[in-house]
Amino acid sequence: MPIFKTGKTHFTTIILIFVSSFTHSQSKEINIKFLGNCGLYITDGTTHIYTDFPYKSGAHGYMEFDSTELDSIKHNSIFIFTHKHSDHYSKKHLNKILKEKGGQKYGVSNISELENLNNSLDNFEIKAFKTTHKVFGISFRHYSYLITWHGKRIYLSGDTTNPETIGKIKNMDWAFVPYWILLNAKEQEIEIDSKMLGVYHLYPEQIPSANKKWSNIDSIQPMTEQGEKITIKL
Ligand SMILES: [Zn+2]
């Protein structure tokens, strides 16, 4: 009897360990919330990453956002910016948040520090790619990013018009690109190797036509509704 009892206990324990690790890994997912323009909130529940947010609401005729979005920014978040134009970046909002809630920001002025960040992150890796952003012939410093989380790859194109960089990145799960990248890639016969494309940085007046244009294409999601969520499961 004692032998049988021990055996049974072990068996039960093994089952429990198996079930708990199974459900644990099954529940692992990354959530992306669309905030407006190129603004995304990316989290696995532990690490909080904001990209091109906070920006200046309504800047250059692009999307406005409710001030409650600023209030709901998590403490000690990571802020990544492709460049410093006001439809992507607000120094005023960001400084206030960093002062009140802590956190770290990365962008054109301290891109080399990303390496230190990567060393401190357990589950995420963020890689920056120098990309071009020209307005009326003037070049602005600009970076696109590849965020990797447990092998899942999320690409953030930002404002660059050149599809060359994204064309070299293989096996992406989600690539967030403005519409002009799709047009330029097509024109230059560059293929974008991503399971899903999120078309972001739309003008408010482009929303109805964007929804109509891509409603029947499963692999393209126009980012038209602020607050909408995307889940990537392991
Ligand atoms: Zn922009």
Image: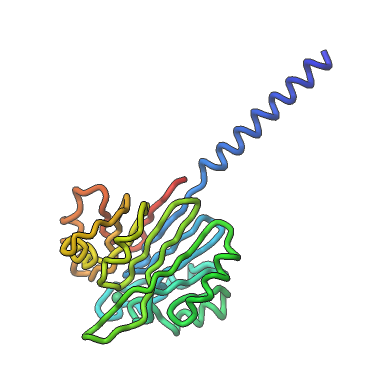
Of residue 123 and residue 164, the one placed in the foreground of this image is 164
- 26 relative position to 81: left or right: right
Counting every numbered tag in the picture gives 0
Work out whether residue 225 can be spotted. no
* Residue 158 position by quadrant: bottom left
Q: Which percent across, then down, holds residue 7?
A: 75, 20
Picture residue at 21% right of the left edge, 63% below the top? 185
Q: Nearer the viewer, residue 135 or 68?
A: 135
The quarter of the picture showing ligand 1:
bottom left
Q: Give the quadrant of residue 55.
A: bottom left
Q: Which quadrant of the rendered structure holds the N terminus?
A: top right
What residue do we see at 81% from left, 16% from top? 3
Quarter of the view holding residue 68: bottom left
**What x and y, as percent, mark residue 138?**
26, 87
Picture coordinates of residue 231, whole percent (x, y): 41, 51
Q: Residue at x 38, y 74 (%)?
A: 130
Residue lying furthest top in this view? 1
- Residue 120 on image: x %, y %: 60, 65
Residue 102 in the figure: left or right of residue 217: right
Residue 34 in sight in this render: yes
